[in-house]
Image: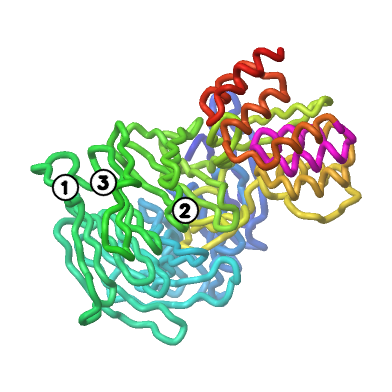
Amino acid sequence: GAGLLLIGFSRGQVVALSTRPNEVAEEMWSNRVHGSQLFGMAYSPSLKRGATAGDGGVKIIDMGSDFKELKGEAISMDTSEDGRPHMIDWSPDGTILTVSTRSGYVYNFLAKMPMIHDHYATNVAYLSSLREISVVDTVSRLKPLSVPVHMEPTFTALGLAHVAVGMNNRIMYYRCAADDVGKVGEQDYVGTVEAVKLNDKFAAVLSDQQVTLHLIEPVKGGGPQRKTFPERDDDGGSYKRATAIALTAQFLIFGTDAGTVEFFYLAEWALLSGAELRHNAAIKAIYPNGQGTRLVIVDENGDGSLYNPVTSDFTPIPEFPSTCTNVLWDKSDKNIVMVHDGADLHTYVYAPITIRGPMMMKLGPLEIDSNGGIRMEPQSFSLSGGWVPILTHNGEITCQTLAGQLQAVTSPTYDHNDEKERNNKERQLLRFTQNLALLRLREAWAAALALNKPRYWHALANKAMQVMDVDMAIRVYRQIGDAGMVMGLESLKYMEDKNLLAGHIALLFMDYSMAQDLFLSSSRPLSALEMRRDL
């Protein structure tokens, strides 16, 4: 498969030869997989994995790019003559690996679990066997809580103390507390369920272009318990067709085919008309942060934007992958967003306040020139074959593997984000550039102290000015002895009008055109005239 010929030898050696025209018979990889005997081999094109049967059992080899033996997925079998594996093969879709033994037994191993998972805060729920959901805290890494379920689900959802599983139009709800695991309800919905979300009390279900909001565990006399959206009188038009949902502790958020995003405040049981977004394309997906105060919105054209309902700022996301499959808000760093396109992860930082207004910046390797100028090359990074990201916390990404298990990987953007080896200048430089890219200016200051070179201080000052962190800029300029900039910034320290402040910062950098535009849009447009007079 994929231009390779796999050859096994009876003594346990396995060799991969190229069949591509320009490198025919060239050896790409060779290894002694089994100690003394090899009985059979099989290859799965869908998984891009090879399986070998020999002494010691069954070995699995990742044939994707690095030909790595997956020791954690090896299968130990009886080493006696009758119990030794004899023949081996994959099912066409790679889901099941079948092994026969010399004694006539046939074993079927589930090699690929359905990718079914959800998360709530830092907890992850995932399908750990065909009729079992496991719930684990990805920060504490305590023993997972197992929740037996009564069906083989095709989707799941996790709330604060409940987990839901379902297929087609039916959903079963289970309590998932340490001392209380059990089924608490079951409901059928109109049409096939497209999405389900839970919080501490409510379930929101999208089916048949309608959103049903209801209590997970109904309470007699407990106030409003069920509602259907959208409520607009649109005679079946696009405003009546819901296309995406999200649920936080305070809000139900749903998008429509008309391009609106609406907020329903659970505490007051009412729609918030002032927070509604009207977009020019149908909404495909909504990904809110934990509080629902910022949303990444993906429309039918595959374009991504960040919406802040508090300020009504709508910020397009640059180089947004059109094949987006998931968006992760970092649970520790509120301004970091990761976008998965099915193969790679793209990392963005959101700066709500800059001299150019709210910005989303795609991250990558950052370089600093001799004058403190900053240049960043946006870059994505790949996950291991078949891994699907579920959540991220301080740069550690929890993924579900093809085998159905959870694995964590650290984003390259965070891999030197600590205080180790203060005297190692190379490591401190990586720490400085990574924190600067992440807009963690306090941590970048600590790394700059270790490096203590003018260009790094100027880079930190430039970034602080860009995001209008006047206090940090004053601190840096005081460190490098620039009394003029310190005095100039001290006079701006308590300025509340963002446009006016940004105009004065642009003026300090001698960008007069930008300063003029910012002054004219501020509460004191006269500053533009005064600037031109003084030039």
Three-letter residue code for mark 1 = Arg
The quadrant of the rendering that contains the C terminus is: top right
Q: Which mark is residue 243?
A: 3
Q: Secondary structure at mark 2?
A: loop
180 in relation to 6, above or below = below
Q: Nearer the viewer, mark 2 or mark 3?
A: 2
In the image, the segment drawn in magenta is 457-483
Q: At 41% from the left edge and 37% from the top edge, which residue is drawn?
A: 323
Determine crowd level at label 1: few under 14, some 14-19, many 20+ residues with C-alpha closer than 10 A.
few
Question: Which of the 4 image quarters holds residue 346?
Answer: top right
Label whose residue precedes the other's in the sequence (1 or 3): 1
Residues under numbered marks 2 and 1 in contact, where contact means CB atoms less than 8 Å apart: no
Residue 464 among those drawn in magenta: yes
Q: Position of residue 490 (x, y in %)?
A: 76, 38
Q: Which mark is residue 289?
A: 2
Label whose residue precedes the other's in the sequence (2 or 1): 1
Three-letter residue code for mark 2 = Asn
In depth, the one of 441 and 532 nearer the eye is: 532
Determine crowd level at label 3: few under 14, some 14-19, many 20+ residues with C-alpha closer than 10 A.
many
Q: Which mark is residue 232?
A: 1
Q: Residue furthest left?
A: 235
